[in-house]
Amino acid sequence: MNEQKGGGPNGVAAPHPGYRATLLGLRLHLVLMCLALLLPALLAGGLTAWQLGAAYRQASETGLRGTARATAAAIDQQLTTAITAAVTLAGSLDRSPGGPAALSGFYAQARAVGEAFGGWVVLAQADGSQLLNTLHPLGQPLPRARGLPWITRALETGEAVLSDRLFTGGTVQRPILAAFVPLREDAGPRTVLILAFEPARLATLLGQIREGQIAGLIEVESGRIVARSVAHESQVGQVAPRWVAEALAREEGGVTAGPSIEGAGIVLAFQRLEGVPWAAAVTMPRQAYDMAWQSPLLNLALGGLALLLAAMLLAAWRARRFLAPLDALTAEAEAVAAGRPVPAASSPFTVAEFETLRQAMGQATTAMRARAMAEGRAAAALEMMAALRTERDRARLYFDAAGTMLLVLSPEGAVQGINRHGLEILGLAEEAEVLGQDWFAGFVAARWQARARAAFRAINEGAEDAPEPDLLPVLRPDGEERLVAWRSTALRDPEGNFLALLASGEDITERRASEERQVLLMQEVDHRAKNALALVQSIIRLTRADHPADFADAVEGRVGALARAYTLLARERWAGSDLRELAEAELAAYAAGGRVALSGPVVRLAPEVVQPMSMVLYELASNAARHGALSTPQGRVTLSWERAAGGALRLEWTELGGPALVAGQPTRRGFGSRMIKVAVSGQLGGSLAFDWRPTGLACVLTVAPDRVSIRQARAPLPPLSPPAPVEEAASLATVLHGRRVLLAEDEALVGLELAETLTALGCVVSGPAASLSEAMQLAEQAPLDLAVLDVNLRGQAAFPVADLLVRRGVPVLFVTGYGEMPGGWAAGDGQGRTALLRKPLASGALGGALRRLLDSTAPRPPVAPEPLRGAPPPSRLLRGCG
C-alpha cells in the first residue's frame, strides 16, 4: 500500500497519474506549432496563386489576340493574292484599239482563274455593261455589272481596287466580294476586269483555328459580318452585336467581352486588316476563358489543403517519435530499480538530450565492466597501433607518389594522419594544423556533415550495408570547397573492434568543372546556332517583294547585316560592341563623299542589343538608299546619339537632300518598318517616332538604360571612310579570263556558288575540292594562276596547300567564316601573295580580291594576311562559313 501511495519498489517514485495525459498534450502542442508555421506560408501561397491566376488570364488573352492577328494576316494575304491574280490576268489580256479582240482564248484562262478562287471573272465597261462573264457562255446577253463605285474608282485611279464591303452580284444574286483592275487606256474603251468570289472562301480560311473558337470578318464602319467560321450562310450580312461594333471602331486591336449573337457569354479578340477596313475577330466561350485561369487557383487550393493535412499527420508522427524515448528511459529506470539487467537499446535515440540522459543512467551500472574490458584491450591496441604507424608512413610515400590523398581517422572521427598531397588539397602547410581535429566538423561542408557522419558511424559499427560516399567535398580554411572521390577501408583488431578508418581521395574539382564547362559550351553553341537559323528563317518568311530579284536582294542584305553583327560580337567574345563600330559597319557602303556623318559619346551596347540595333540601322540605310536621301548624289544622312532622361540612349536619324516626300506617314507599312518598330519596342526596350518631312525622313529612337553603357561625351566623330570600290563585272571578266583557279570548299552549296561565280568571271575552275587531300592532289597536278581556299576543310586547315602554292608563286585568297585567322599561318608566310575574305561574301568582292592579288606580283616584305575591308552596298551574299 505504501508503494502505491508514496513510491515504488526500492523507493523509486511511481508514475504520476497524469503522465499519459501529458503525452497527449505534447502531441497536441506539436500539431498546433505546425499549424502556426504553415498558416503564414499558406497565406503567402494564396496570394501567389492569385497573381498566378492573373498571369494565366493574361496569357489566355495574349493567345487569343495572337490568333486574331494571325487570322488578320492570313486574310490580308488571301486578299492580296486575289488582287495579284486579277492584275496578272488583266496583263495577259490582248485587246486591240477600236473594239474587243477575240475573247475565246482569254475566256478559258479567265474561267480557270475564277474557279481557282472559287468565283468567276467579268469584263465590264465604265457604265457596268458586261463584255464577258465566265458564269455565262460567250455571246450570251449579260446583265449589267454591280459594284459601279469600285469600277469608277479603279478607272479614276488606274490601280487595282478591292471592294471594301459586300454587295449583291448581278448574276448570282448573293453577297459577293471582288477585285477590280483597270485595263490599259490605249486598248480601247475604258474597261475593268473583275475577279469576283463569295465570302464563303474566306469563311473556309477562318475555319482553320483552334477547336472551340469562332472566327469572323466584320466591317468596321457598318458592323456587318463578312464571313464566319461557323454558321456562315446564316450570319453573312448580319450586324454584329453593338458592343463588338463599338470596340472595333475605337481601336485597331484588343480584347473585349460580352454576349454573342446566340446570347452566350464570349471573350472576343480582334485585329484590323491592313488592306480593307475590316477586322478579324476570334471568340471563345466565357466559361472556357474563366476555366483557363480559375483551374490553377482551384488546384493550388486543393494542394494547400493536402499539404496542411500532411503537416498535421507528420506532427502527430513526430510526437510519437518523441514519446518513444521517454517510454524506453522509464523501462530502463524500472529495471535498475528492480535489479534486472538493463535492456539493450536497438539504436541511439534521435533526440540528443534523450540519448545523453540514457547514457548517463547506464554509466553507473557499466563503468566497472567497461574499465576491465578497456584494460584488456589496451595492450593489444598499442601493439597494433605501433605497427600501423610504420605501415602508415610507408603508405604516405606511395599515395604522395600517386597524387592521392591519404587520411586516417580515429573511432571518434579525429584526424590521426594525413599525407603531403592531402595537405595540398586542404590548402595547409603542416600536418600539425589538422592532427587531432574533428574531421567532419572542421573539413566537411555543413550540408554534407550529417551524411558523412552517418556513413562513418555505420562503418564503425560494422554494418554490412554501410553507405560509403563516393563523392564528398572537403572544406578548406579559406572557405573553398574541393570535390574529392573517396575510397575507404576499416581497420579492426583481431576481435573485430574498430581501430581506425583509412581513406584515400582523389581531387576531381578541375575535372568536374571542365566537364560542366564543356556541357555549358555545347548548350550555348546549340542555342546560338538555332537562334541564328530561326532569325534567318523569320527574315525569309517575312520579307515581301514583287520580283524574285528584289526578294533575293532584300533577304541577303538583311542576312548580311546579321552577319556583320555576329562578326563584331565574336570579335568581342560576345561581350557586346561599340555603337560607332556597329554604325560604321552598316553605313560604310554609303560613306563616299562624306554623305554619312556620325556624332555622339562612347556607347557600349549589351550583347543582346547588338543584333537588333544592326538590323534597325540596316533597314534605315536601305530605305534611304531606295527611296530617301541616299538615292540621290546630293543626299546626306546624319546619325547622332546622346544620353536621354533617365539614362536611356537617344538616337536621331536625319535625311537631307533627297527626293521631295509627301508630308505625312505612308499609308503602307513594309516589313522593314514593322521590324524596326518590333525591335525597338521589344529587344531595345525603347520607343520609336518617325517624322516624314518633305525634306526627308527624320527618325528618333531610344534604348533602355539597362542595355547600354554611355561614357563621357566627345566631339563629333570624323566622317566615315568609304569602302573599297566594287569593280565592274566586265572589267573583272577581262582581267580574269582564262585564269586557272583552284577552288577548295567543303560546304557543297557554297562551293557550287563560288564555282559558278568564278566561271562567270571567265576563270577555269579546278574543283571544288572538299578535303585537304583532294586539294593537295589538285594543287600538285594542275598548273594554276590563282587559288581560293576555305581555311577549314572538314576539320583540317588548308595551310599546307597554301604553303605549297605560295612557294610556287601562286597567289592565294583565303575565304572563311572565322572572325580571326586561326593558328597555323604565321606572319610572313604569305610572302605578300595572300589575302583574306570573310563569309558571307558580297557580290563583286570575290572578283575584286582576285584582281588585287594578280596586281601584287612585285616583290615586297612578307606580311600577314590582311582582311579585305569595305563591303559594297546591301547586295547578294555568298552563304556559308568555314
Image: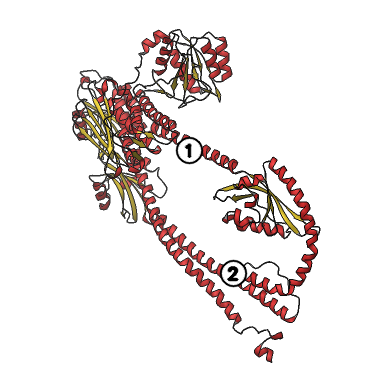
Which quarter of the figure has residue 183? top left
The residue tagged with tag 2: helix, strand or loop? helix
433 relative to 719, above or below: below
Residue 598's place in the image compared with 473, above or below, is above
The picture quadrant where one finds residue 731 is top left
Q: Image quadrant for the N terminus? A: bottom right
> Which residue is located at x 28 percent, y 33 percent?
714
Number of other residues with Cα within 10 Å of mark 2, as a class: few under 14, some 14 to 19, many 20 or more: some
Of residue 381 and residue 168, the one placed in the foreground of this image is 381
Q: Is residue 308 left or right of residue 675?
A: right
User: Badge 2 is on which residue?
Assistant: 317
Categorize mark 1 by other alpha carbons within 10 Å: few (<14), some (14-19), many (20+). Answer: few
Q: Which residue is mark 1?
A: 527
Give x and y (percent) for residue 518: 55, 38
Q: Are marks 2 and 1 in contact (CB under 8 Å)?
A: no
Relative image position of residue 354 (x, y in whole percent): 63, 71
Q: Is residue 460 left or right of residue 611?
A: right
Picture residue at 58% right of the left edge, 50% below the top: 476
Viewer-proximal residue, 341 or 95?
Answer: 341
Question: What residue occupies the far bottom of the structure in this picture?
Answer: 1
Q: Count numbered badges in the picture.
A: 2
Q: Position of residue 637 (x, y in %)?
A: 25, 27
- Label 2 sits on what residue type? Trp
Q: Secondary structure at mark 1?
A: helix
Q: Earlier in the sequence, mark 2 or mark 1?
A: 2
359 left or right of 577? right
Note whether residue 182 is visible: no
CA separation, marks 2 and 1?
Answer: 49 Å
Q: Nearer the viewer, residue 359 or 207?
A: 359
**Three-letter amino acid code of the residue under disc 1:** His
